[in-house]
């Protein structure tokens, strides 16, 4: 057997077990959340956070923002987030480019994430074109297909500025026509007019495709499409102004967390002195606050900046993949979403 065949066999062995995304409809977490509410420590924090999320769903005036940072989508929560969009349990999404492109759009194209049943030397993984996220694998060759698809979408667009929301909408449209996975967040968001914002969009596989689009257009002397980060901030702030009451369900921190919280301050700068701070807020994170990092600033701290109401907030210090299934399943089975009006904020920009 030659070296190429040996490598192919080894790669197939390492990529033999796919990550199966959890189905929040398949089990009812209400009894365990109720029991956790009678406990202490993180269990009680999670029960209170779940209660706050249910309050958001019950409030007929509340627009809910799902805010995602980190790798929970690759780790098995992808279908949970998709269900929140399908069932009208969130109205807009703010996320990292990796969550939207390298994870969701990637699987929408028919590719998979894989469980690492063993973790060999990372140089070995590199030689096999396997990328690693802790104990999860991605086939680099499949990821490059994602890069090239982004390139193809960009080439087909009119050469002008686009917010990340507008470009991601084109990605959703592409998946409707060419996708291979029904339960894609990007696809469902397009179908339900739920806008997705990625304030650091090029920090993902989208970046490679968009750079290639720009370079190729420059070489050919043609104009090219560009991403307008200012439009991102303006559009998201516009939703906040028109929404009034709002709630945040935040997984992780980083740029997405700060971006959505800053819409309150931005609205004030634009002369909307009556804009409401985010009334409800839940953050699930493992980040430490002692280094002063913005990613891990508590929601109480955010109140000092005039971003979040201190009355209805909860920090949950836990790995999100272990608690999001419980929170989302509880909210799904309590059913407040069934009578909730869908905002369809995506239509605001048509």
Image (spheres, grey):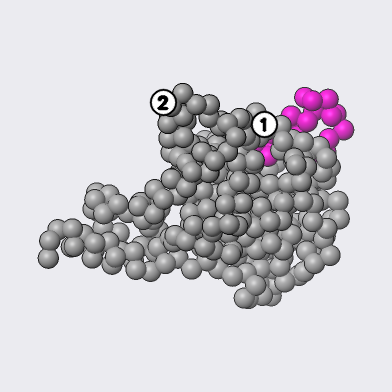
Q: 130 above or below 295?
A: below
* Residue at the disc numbered 1: 231
Is residue 274 part of the magenta span, yes or no? yes
Quadrant in which the C terminus is drawn? top right
Q: Position of residue 58 (x, y in %)?
A: 82, 60
Inspect the magenta stretch and tell me whether residue 73 lies in it: no
Give the label on residue 219, or none. 2
**Image point 60% across, 57% down: which residue?**
176
Residue visible at 53% across and 44% down?
153
Q: Between residues 94 and 310, which one lies in front from this camera angle? A: 94
Task: Tell me if I can see residue 61 in this picture.
Answer: yes
Image location of residue 54, percent across then percent down:
76, 61
Q: Residue at x 30, y 59 (%)?
A: 119
Element class at badge 2: helix
- Work out whether 337 lies above or below 130: below
Q: Report the span colored magenta.
A: 259-278
The label nearer to you, 1 versus 2, is: 2
How far, Cα to Cα, is label 1 from label 2?
A: 27 Å
Give the x, y percent position of residue 325.
60, 65
Name the residue furthest left.
1
> Which residue appears at 60% of the width and 35% of the height?
158
Secondary element at image label 1: helix
């Amino acid at each position: 057997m030659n070296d190429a065949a040996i490598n192919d066999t080894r790669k197939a062995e390492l990529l033999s077990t796919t990550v199966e995304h959890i189905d929040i409809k398949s089990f009812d977490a209400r009894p365990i959340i109720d029991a956790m509410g009678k406990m202490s420590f993180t269990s009680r924090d999670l029960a209170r956070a779940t209660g706050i999320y249910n309050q958001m769903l019950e409030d007929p005036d509340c627009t809910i923002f799902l805010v995602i940072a980190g790798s929970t989508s690759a780790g098995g929560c992808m279908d949970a987030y998709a269900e929140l969009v399908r069932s009208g349990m969130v109205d807009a999404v703010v996320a990292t480019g990796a969550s939207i492109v390298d994870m969701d759009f990637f699987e929408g194209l028919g590719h998979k994430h894989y469980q690492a049943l063993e973790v060999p030397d990372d140089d070995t993984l590199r030689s096999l074109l396997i990328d690693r996220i802790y104990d999860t694998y991605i086939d680099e060759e499949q990821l490059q297909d994602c890069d090239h698809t982004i390139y193809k979408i960009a080439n087909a667009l009119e050469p002008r500025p686009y917010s990340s929301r507008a470009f991601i909408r084109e990605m959703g449209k592409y998946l409707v026509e060419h996708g291979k996975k029904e339960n894609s967040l990007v696809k469902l968001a397009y179908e339900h007019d739920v806008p997705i914002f990625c304030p650091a969009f090029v920090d993902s596989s989208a970046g490679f495709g968009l750079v290639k689009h720009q370079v190729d257009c420059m070489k050919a002397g043609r104009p090219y499409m560009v991403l307008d980060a200012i439009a991102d901030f303006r559009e998201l702030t516009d939703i906040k102004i028109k929404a009034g009451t709002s709630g945040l369900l935040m997984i992780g921190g980083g740029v997405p967390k700060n971006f959505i919280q800053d819409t309150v301050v931005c609205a004030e700068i634009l002369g909307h002195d009556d804009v409401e701070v985010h009334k409800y807020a839940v953050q699930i994170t493992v980040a430490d606050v002692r280094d002063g990092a913005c990613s891990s600033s508590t929601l109480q701290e955010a109140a000092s900046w005039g971003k979040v109401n201190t009355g209805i907030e909860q920090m949950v210090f836990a790995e999100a993949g272990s608690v999001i299934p419980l929170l989302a399943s509880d909210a799904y089975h309590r059913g407040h979403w069934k009578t909730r009006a869908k905002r369809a904020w995506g239509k605001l920009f048509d």
